[in-house]
Image: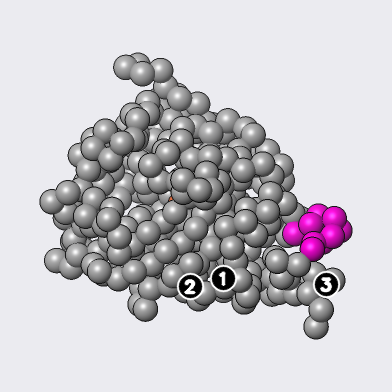
Amino acid sequence: MEKNNELTIQKLNNVGVEVSGLDINQPISEEIKSQLHAIWLEHGIVVFRDQPDITPESLIDFSRIFGPLEMHPLKATTSSEYPELFILENGGETDKFNTAYYDGEAIVNRLIWHMDLHYTGKPNRGAILSAVHVAEEDGLTGFGDLAKAYSALPEQLKNKIADLDVAYTFEMQRIKWRFADNSGYEPGPFSPKSPSDVGFPDFPDAIYPMVVTHPETGDKILEIVEQFLDRVIEPEKVGMTQAESDQLLHELIEHIRRPEFHYWHDWRIGDMVLWDNWRAMHCTTGTRAGIKRLINRTTIEGGYTLGRQLAANA
Ligand SMILES: [Fe+2]
């Protein structure tokens, strides 16, 4: 069938959709572009498979359908040739900094549930991942729909969290992330201890409403992810102690971990995944030491500040 005339949408497991009928290297009409944009808004997680030849240029051009592209604030991780490309590499020179132990096994680049650039208070609008080299095993990317997670909360809990704010603390050491599941986890010998160890600037705490209203769709998003989650701000204003509010966060973390909100992408060459970073969290299983995996990412600029930053030293 000729490509780029008609898109077909198929639901994935639990959340998100797969779109077929597209070839990103062929011209895409304005009509198809606006359909793609609408699919992204409606479903939040969009998979494209069997793209015959994704070049950096074609990925960058395709990504611009969804908005202006953002250069990542951390220059070290972008391609020198294509500043719009963020390169995620396993099996390369940066492995030693990204290796940690899980039940005694060395794993590279495992990341728990997070949203990109969440720590800045201004998360990017979205992103696209494109597989350049896939791992023979592992190397999965998980996506979680936090609009669905919010909708599935009991009404009583929705009311309880409606006016609460939550703080995320930028911290390199996973062991200090208060709501990570660190059972069986041990940092590697080169795991960064402070942001400057890997050339990152430091960031003050980012504060978000626990329920963010998506600026474009109006959907309510449960703004709870594992990475950097630290505390509820002034829980006493709704009659809760700090300990009770920690318990509430544990409950919400258990909620977002429910598999019914998740889609796991097992990469093949020619795959791309687009997601709405204002709505969907993601994570990676990582790979065993020495396994090669290369993913290119483009980042769609976030035009809104969804959170706010606490002033430094506040
Ligand atoms: Fe990420």
- Check disc 1 and give the amino acid type: Asp
- Between residue 156 and residue 164, name the one nearer to us: 164
Determine whether the beta carbon of the residue marked 2 sits less than 8 angstroms from the nearest atom of ligand 1: no
Q: Residues within 10 Å of mark 1 (few under 14, many from 20)?
A: many
Q: Residue at x 80, y 69 (%)?
A: 4
Q: Which mark is residue 271?
A: 1
- Find disc 2 in the rendering and name its residue: 267
Q: Quadrant of residue 182?
A: bottom left
- Find disc 3 in the rendering and name its residue: 6
Magenta highlight range: 27-36
Residue 2 in percent (x, y) is at 81, 79
Q: Quadrant of the C terminus?
A: top left
Q: Is residue 311 left or right of residue 110?
A: right
| C-alpha span from label 2 to label 3 | 25 Å
Q: Evaluate if marks 2 and 1 touch, with contact meaning CB atoms under 8 Å apart.
A: yes
For numbered disc 2, what is the local secondary structure? loop
Q: Which mark is residue 251?
A: none
